[in-house]
Amino acid sequence: PRAIKPLQDLAVSARGIETRMAAYRSLGHIRHPEAIEFLEQALHSEFTIRCRAVIALGEIGDSRALPGLLAMLRDPAAEVRHHAAVALGQSGDATALHPLADRLTQEEDQMVRRGLARALPQLGDPRGEKLLDESRSVRVKRELKRRLAKLLPIGLRDQFEVLISGSIAKLSNPRVLLKWGGGGAGALALLVGLGWLLYWMFGRPPVYRAGQ
């Protein structure tokens, strides 16, 4: 389309960031693969432009944009990584499945992790939520072990690590919580007790973000 070249010029030369962002947004809405090369170059630009370029590449939905989007899963900015995960899910290209699942096991930011988990079913892998829960358990165990190294003698530390390894997986299962707690009220009390344990160990109450 003839509109692509003027939009690209506007995205580069416009003085105001809002005008530049609007140009990138329009390139995504046109959904023509002719804009892919230009948008990929923008992946090395400033934060706001990287975000908009990733979103536009996802809207175009062409497999030629896949390498650039996969690379953005390791961008320093969590927002960029999140948009890359969403764009890869929209792409419908199953070759992104393994990189997305692999990234989910390493990602620390909760917003990005949710985006990765939601992208997997879009590409035909129903394990998104399961992998999210598993990786969360691994992260909790890793943090507990790190803290235990400072709090407990070696002998007690080893015994407690065995207990934690089995308990974290069980605590993620609502049926187990109800069984251990003897009902809804008991399960709630069990969770409150765990919260106080974490408070004592970490020196602050656990913080839960929306969507966890």
Image: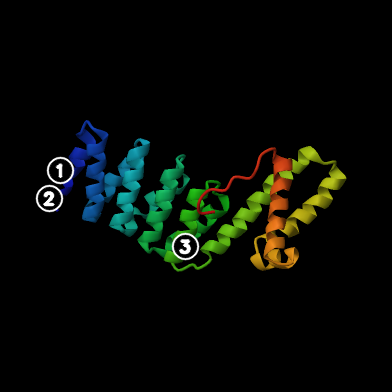
Q: Amino acid at mark 1?
A: Pro
- For residue 92, which quarter of the picture? bottom left
Nearest to viewer (mark 1 / mark 3): 3
Q: Is residue 204 visible?
A: yes
User: Residue 185 at what x, y percent from top left?
Assistant: 69, 62
Q: Is residue 203 above or below residue 106?
A: above
Residue at (34%, 39%) from the top-left corner? 48
- For residue 17, which quarter of the picture? top left
- Residue closest to the eye, 33 or 168: 168
Q: State the SS at label 2.
A: loop
The answer for how far apart the CA atoms under marks 3 and 2 are is 36 Å
- Residue closest to the eye, 62 or 16: 16
Q: Check disc 2 and report the residue beneath it.
A: 2
Q: Residues within 10 Å of mark 3 (few under 14, many from 20)?
A: many
- Residue closest to the eye, 138 or 96: 138
* N-term-proximal mark, 1 vs 3: 1
* N-term-proximal mark, 3 vs 2: 2
Q: Check disc 1 and report the residue beneath it.
A: 6
Residue at (32%, 45%) from the top-left corner? 52
Q: Residues within 10 Å of mark 1 (few under 14, many from 20)?
A: few
Q: Is residue 170 visible?
A: no
Q: Check disc 3 and report the residue beneath it.
A: 120
User: Residue 100 at what x, y percent from top left?
Assistant: 48, 56
User: Residue 89 at what x, y percent from top left?
Assistant: 40, 59
Q: Amino acid at mark 3?
A: Leu
Nearest to viewer (mark 3 / mark 2): 3
Kindly identify which numbered label has been placed on residue 154: none
Q: Residues within 10 Å of mark 2 (few under 14, many from 20)?
A: few
Q: Is residue 55 left or right of residue 166?
A: left
Q: Is residue 198 above or below residue 98?
A: above
